[in-house]
Image: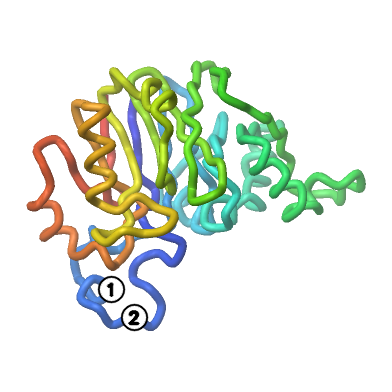
Amino acid sequence: MKLTFLGTGTSQGVPVIACRCNVCRSSDERDTRLRTSALLTVGNNNILFDIGPDFRQQMLHHHVDHLDAILITHAHRDHVGGLDDIRSFNYVQHSKMNLYLNAEAKTALLRDYKYIFDYHQYPGLPEAELHEVGESPFLAAGETVIPICAMHKDLPILGFRIRNFAYITDANYIAPSEMEKLKGVDVMVINALRKEKHFSHYSLPEALEVISQVKPREAYLTHISHELGLHAVVERELPAGVHLAYDNRTLNF
């Protein structure tokens, strides 16, 4: 499997518009972060985690020529704002795009992207098949996916485990029963917004506590804000086996 971090930033990205902090003015490319998304390649299949507003730019930058499934963590705009651009893949692949999401995200997409799912199909609109998933494993692009139910403040969201890899973002609580689903993963991605506590995202100390419970071989932090600090500085402060993700970083495992 190969994982490509397409974006590792928050809803505002980094640099933040009009901000003059050290991180936003950094010349280190690792401090420039598009909205959070990642591409998992398993054999010849591409599975996308979230489809944010930078989706078009991310696909072009990485020369992605096909997508087999999109796993949606939740329907906040920084995670689904690129949905309209799936029509390029519809055209090339001659098929609807398969999206896997929970009930809350499905309701939000049907409301916010009504023009896509309305009974009147205007020629050239994006085409998507919404697959509502719950707590049970499901198949996507030929892979068994184990959903990890988590909370983003009071919003139920999903993380995902595929084989010995797990991807979680925007969480600030995972119940003990869901934590059990993460045991035995080799590589784990989890959000860490900043060092200070936040009302809806794991802080760095909280993310490190989850990692210490799961005990993956390697862990990568994503959904990083400019408030976390400079990549080069924070990376040196992390425990062994834990790293900051950055845009365009790839992992092979």
**Whole-percent x, y for residue 51 in the image:** 54, 47
Quadrant of the rendered image containing residue 227: bottom left
Height in image: 16 above or below 192? Answer: below
225 or 92, which lies in front? 225
Q: Residue 249 at what x, y percent from top left? A: 27, 45
What's under tag 1, amino acid-wise?
Cys
* Element on which disc 2 rests: loop
Measuring from the top left, give residue 19's x and y in whole percent: 34, 80
Question: Mark 2 sits on what residue?
Answer: 19
Q: Nearer the viewer, residue 251 or 233?
A: 233
Q: Nearer the viewer, residue 205 or 81?
A: 205
Contact? badges 1 and 2 (CB < 8 Å): yes
Q: Earlier in the sequence, mark 1 or mark 2?
A: 2
Q: Three-letter amino acid code at disc 2?
A: Cys
Q: Is residue 112 left or right of residue 172?
A: right
The CA span between labels 1 and 2 is 6 Å
Task: Describe residue 222's horizontal placement relative to residue 48 as left or right.
Answer: left
Instruction: Tell me the tag on residue 220.
Output: none
Residue at 80% x, 44% y is: 117
- On residue 24, which mark appears? 1
Left or right relative to 253: residue 35: right
Mark 1 crowdedness (10 Å alpha carbons): few <14, some 14-19, many ≥20? many
SS for dot 1: loop
